[in-house]
Image (cartoon, rainbow, N blue to C red):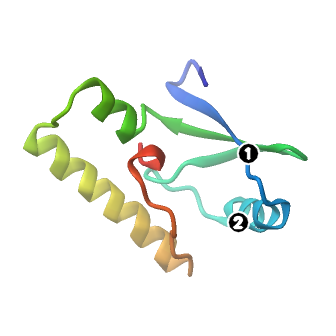
Amino acid sequence: MRRLQDGRVLRVWLRSSRTDAVRELDLMSKLPRHPHLCQLLDVSPHGAILGFYGESLQQKLHKQQYLPADECQSLVGQCADGLAALHDFGVIHADLTPANMC
């Protein structure tokens, strides 16, 4: 991962199934920009580069076992907002885990 000057973190995203990867990357390239969705920055034959702000929820929970209630409430609201944007676009997120929540 690499941090840009604007605060975004770049993460290389590789998938094992080429057919699934092409389909997911094509879908991601068509999504509207949204403050609570990561942004597809670049695609290569080997994967993609995603841009997002901050660290993942998994990284936060690794550093500190518990999060304050107000931070949890904010994270849930942001997650719900991002999922609603996906649903409005006709997409259902099938892999929502702390590792892919920022």
What percent of the width, then of the height, locates residue 24? Answer: 71, 64
Q: Is residue 5 above or below residue 40?
A: above
Q: The disc labelled 2 sits on which kind of residue?
A: Lys
Q: Which badge, 2 or 1, is on the more N-terminal residue?
A: 1
Residue sitting at x 51%, y 70%: 94
Can you name the residue that lies furthest to the right here? 45
Q: Residues within 10 Å of mark 2 (few under 14, many from 20)?
A: few
Q: Which mark's residue is nearer the viewer, 2 or 1? A: 1
Q: The disc labelled 1 sits on which kind of residue?
A: Leu
Identify residue for label 1.
14
Identify residue for label 2.
30
What percent of the width, then of the height, locates residue 18? Answer: 84, 60
Can you name the residue that lies furthest to the front here? 16
Give the numbered dot on residue 23: none
Residue sitting at x 82%, y 62%: 22
Residue sitting at x 42%, y 67%: 83
**Left or right, residue 73 beside residue 58:** left
Kind of element beneath mark 1: loop
